Image (cartoon, helix red, strand yellow):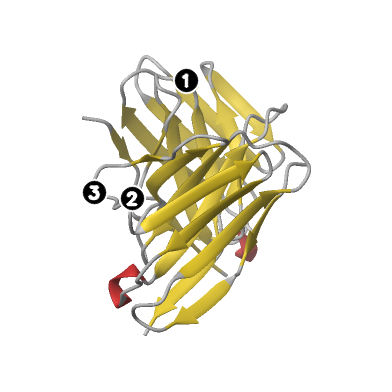
């Protein structure tokens, strides 16, 4: 079966750095997405990785290792507004998105 | 950037009635629209994939006669929850993929449905 694993919840301090991991087992691979979702709102796109390596976008970076079925989202200089759920999703060989359950990130002052 | 407009944002309806949710792609053509449902503290669950001009493809366990999907144009897809029950209360979100540099799927703002 297809499976996406990510931690249920993480806590970090304002101004610090946090890394949210995602491991996956899917039927084929056509890219991995990270989305941010605030409570009661729709997800918003953060990043897309299809090749191995690190993609940096401001305070957020996303890493992919296809051989290990592994990705992480790195958030630097954490702000209170970064408190949200972070969803990992993989596009399989049928171009269908398989979603992780999301990681709830709690930022403390 | 690509925008998907979803209406209504929230709706309360009585059991047994029907509710229609609309999703419009404002600045791109969405040949395919995805409909998701999300229960509290759970991940997105794909309900169906809607293709313009053809019948929607439903995921296993989703009743196609209960969740009617129409995708009559390249910019509009609708989901109608028929004979709604309290267990249908959920957050419904549509999504479409706009071909662009970020490869991202754009989501509508979501519809909070409460059936009483």
SS at circle 3: loop
**Are tags 1 and 3 found on a single chain?**
no
Between A3 and A74, which is closer to the camera in this rendering? A3
Q: Is residue B56 above or below residue B112?
A: above
Closer to the eye: label 3 or 2: 2
Q: How many marks?
A: 3
Between B86 and A85, which is closer to the camera in this rendering? B86
Q: Quadrant of residue A75?
A: top right
Q: Residue at x 33, y 30 (%)?
A: A24
Q: Is residue A39 left or right of residue B97?
A: left
Q: Residues within 10 Å of mark 3 (few under 14, many from 20)?
A: few
Q: Quadrant of residue A69?
A: top left
Q: CA distance from mark 3 to mark 2?
A: 9 Å
Q: Is residue A26 above or below residue B47?
A: above
Q: Position of residue B18 (x, y in %)?
A: 43, 71
> Can residue A58 be seen by looking at this rendering?
yes
Closer to the eye: label 2 or 1: 2
Q: Residues within 10 Å of mark 1 (few under 14, many from 20)?
A: some
Q: Residue at x 64, y 37 (%)?
A: B30
SS at circle 2: loop
Q: Residue at x 40, y 77 (%)?
A: B17
The residue that disc 3 covers is: B61
Subunit of label 2:
B
Q: Residue at x 55, y 54 (%)?
A: B78
The residue that disc 1 covers is: A30
Between B112 and A88, which is closer to the camera in this rendering? B112
The residue that disc 2 covers is: B64
């Amino acid at each position: 079966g297809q499976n996406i694993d990510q931690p249920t919840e993480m806590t970090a301090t304002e101004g610090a750095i946090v890394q949210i991991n995602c491991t996956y087992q899917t039927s084929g691979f056509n890219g991995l997405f990270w989305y941010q979702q605030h409570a009661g709102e729709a997800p918003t796109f953060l990043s897309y990785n299809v090749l191995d390596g690190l993609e940096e976008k401001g305070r957020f970076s996303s890493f992919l290792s296809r051989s290990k079925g592994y990705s992480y989202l790195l958030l630097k200089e954490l702000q209170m507004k970064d408190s949200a759920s972070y969803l990992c999703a993989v596009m399989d060989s049928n171009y269908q998105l398989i979603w992780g359950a999301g990681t709830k990130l709690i930022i403390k002052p | 950037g690509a925008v998907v407009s979803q209406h209504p944002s929230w709706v309360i309806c009585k059991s047994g009635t029907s509710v229609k949710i609309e999703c419009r792609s404002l600045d791109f053509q969405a040949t395919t629209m995805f409909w998701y449902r999300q229960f509290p503290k759970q991940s997105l669950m794909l309900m169906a994939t809607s293709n313009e001009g053809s019948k929607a493809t439903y995921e296993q366990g989703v009743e196609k006669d209960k969740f009617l999907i129409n995708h009559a144009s390249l910019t509009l897809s609708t989901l109608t929850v028929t004979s709604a029950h309290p267990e249908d209360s959920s957050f419904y979100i549509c999504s479409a993929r706009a071909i662009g540099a970020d490869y991202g799927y754009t989501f509508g703002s979501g519809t909070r449905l409460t059936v009483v």
